[in-house]
Image: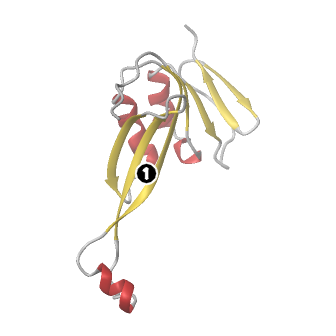
Amino acid sequence: SFKTKTRGAIQHLAIDATGLKVYGEGEWKVKKHGTDGKRRVWRKLHIAVDTSTHEIVAAELSLSDVTGAEVLPNLLKQTRRKIIEISGDGAYDTRNCHDAIRIKRAVALIPLKVRFSGVVPVNGEAKVDNNFRFFVLRE
C-alpha cells in the first residue's frame, strides 16, 4: 500500500551505496559459455534511509567509479527535513562529507580512516570517542 512521506526531524539517517550489475545482450551467453573477455557494466545506487521509519529519504544512481563521498552532499540536498545524526562507513570520512553534514547541522557518526591523526573542524567543537568522530555544533 502507498504510504505518505513522513514529516518532521529525522533522528538518524544511514547512508550507503551498493553496486548494481547492468544486464544487456549477451549476458546469457556468458552465463552459459563462460567469460567473453568483455568488461561487465556496473552502476552504484546511493541511498539515505531514515532508520526509524525505514523510509528512503534520498537516492542517486551513479557510474561505478563515483565514490559515496562524492554523492553524500547531493543526497543531503534532496531533503529539507532537519537531521539529528548521520552515519555511514569509513568511505564518508572526508572533509567534503563533514562539511555537508555540518551545513545540515547534524552529528556525523563515521568511523575514522586509518590515516586519522586529529580533528580540526572549521566551525564547531570536535570530540573523538573510540572509533568514531563526532561533530557537535554550537547553537
Question: Can you see residue 118?
Answer: no
Quadrant in the rendering for residue 107 = top right
Secondary-structure class at tag 1: loop
Residue in the image at 63% along x and 47% along y: 113
* x then y, percent, for residue 4: 34, 25
Quadrant in the rendering for residue 59 = top left
Is 95 drawn above or below residue 24 in the view shown? above
Q: Please identify the residue farthest to the top as the structure is shown.
A: 139
The residue closer to the viewer here, 23 or 118, is 23
Question: Can you see residue 132?
Answer: yes
Q: Please identify the residue farthest to the front as the structure is shown.
A: 1
Looking at the image, residue 139 sits to the left or right of residue 4; the answer is right
Quadrant placement of the N terminus: top left
* x then y, percent, for residue 13: 51, 31
The residue closer to the viewer here, 5 or 37, is 5
The three-letter code of the residue at mark 1 reads Thr
Q: Label 1: few (<14), some or many (≥20) within 10 Å?
A: some
Residue in the image at 72% along x and 39% along y: 131
Residue in the image at 58% along x and 11% along y: 138
Is 128 drawn above or below residue 28 in the view shown? above
The residue indicated by pointer 1 is: 67
The residue closer to the viewer here, 48 or 128, is 48
Is 35 drawn above or below residue 66 in the view shown? below
* x then y, percent, for residue 40: 34, 74
